[in-house]
Amino acid sequence: MPEFKTERLTDHITRIYAFSTELMYLVEGERMAALLDTGSGIGSLKACVDRLTDKPVIVLLTHGHIDHAMGAGEFDTVYMNREDDYIYLPHSDRQFRCDSLSLCEPGVGATEADLIPAADVNSFHDLKEGMSFDLGGVHIEVYACPGHTHGSMVMLIPEERAVLLGDACNYLTFMYDTYSLTVSEYEKSLKALEPKIAGKYDTVCLSHGDGNGHKDIIADVIAVCEDIKAGKTDDIPMEFNGTRGLIAKAMGPDMNRIDGGRGNIVYNKDRV
């Protein structure tokens, strides 16, 4: 199993690269550290974190999907919005996880033996909007953004003027499966979130790709929601891991929108 790659973003934030395109973030204060997401549970993430900090570590999960929450079993104190129990439970199934090993990036060579045992969801503390975690000179503020999943959460690090959107809002937000809310409900979530964190961040951290989002990504994805409702979409068919949806805005080989816009959504017409 290859080692996790890490990248120091600031004095307090380290980005951790896992093996199925997912990214995690370690935020370190003077007294303790917080690990934002735990990836697919392939290989020992704790061993990587232990090399980065000797402070006590808590885990804050953006949501309960397989590629964000399955490494939680290595840590003692884990928070997840319990609205996502419904998605964590099937995704933590051993066979589901084994079947998903095929999604690893080429050359990883992960096998069933590399899977960390999944945590019992009942051991998780409930993560709610309005919570704030004091790490010692660095805080993490928590905001709800249901849509991608019912319990999707966003983490603001005010001292760093940085926000982690996870999969709640990104360059290809998955909204097409039955585990997601409708596009209209998602738009309401984004419009509720936007003013709460406006003016509080300059850096946007994402959980896939290169991890870097642009400052106006929330507004741009809201615009895509509006175009979907108005029928102003390209509707490019997409299949992922046996499921199908429509990409709202056509993209080139570089995954950027052909029309020059930023932000995109995969959706189904019966879930608008």
Image: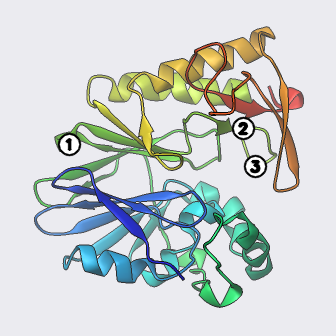
Question: From the viewer's perspective, is 34 left or right of 20?
Answer: left
User: Where is residue 272 drawn, in percent x and y?
Assistant: 79, 25
SS state under label 3: loop
Residue 103 visible (yes or no) = yes
> What is the residue that sits farthest to the bottom in this orientation?
113
At a point 63% along the width and 63% down the height, the residue shown is: 105
Along the viewing direction, whichever of 216 and 199 lies nearer the viewer? 216
Inspect the image, locate mark 3, and give the three-letter code of the amino acid beneath it: Tyr
Inspect the image, locate mark 2, and give the three-letter code of the amino acid beneath it: Met
Along the viewing direction, whichever of 151 and 176 lies nearer the viewer? 176
Question: From the viewer's perspective, is 101 left or right of 169?
Answer: right
| Mark number displayed over residue 175 | 2
Say which of marks 1 and 3 sits in front. 1
Vertical side of 48 occupied by 8: above or below: above
> Pointer 1: residues within 10 angstroms few (<14), some, or many (20+)?
some
Q: Earlier in the sequence, mark 2 or mark 1?
A: 1
Q: Which residue is mark 3?
A: 179
> Pointer 3: residues within 10 angstroms few (<14), some, or many (20+)?
some
User: Where is residue 259 drawn, in percent x and y?
Assistant: 65, 13
Inspect the image, locate mark 1, and give the three-letter code of the amino acid beneath it: Glu
| Mark number displayed over residue 205 | none
Q: Which residue is mark 1?
A: 160
- The Cα atoms of the two marked residues, 1 and 3, are separated by 32 Å
At a point 57% along the width and 33% down the height, the residue shown is: 171
User: Where is residue 258 drawn, in percent x and y?
Assistant: 67, 18
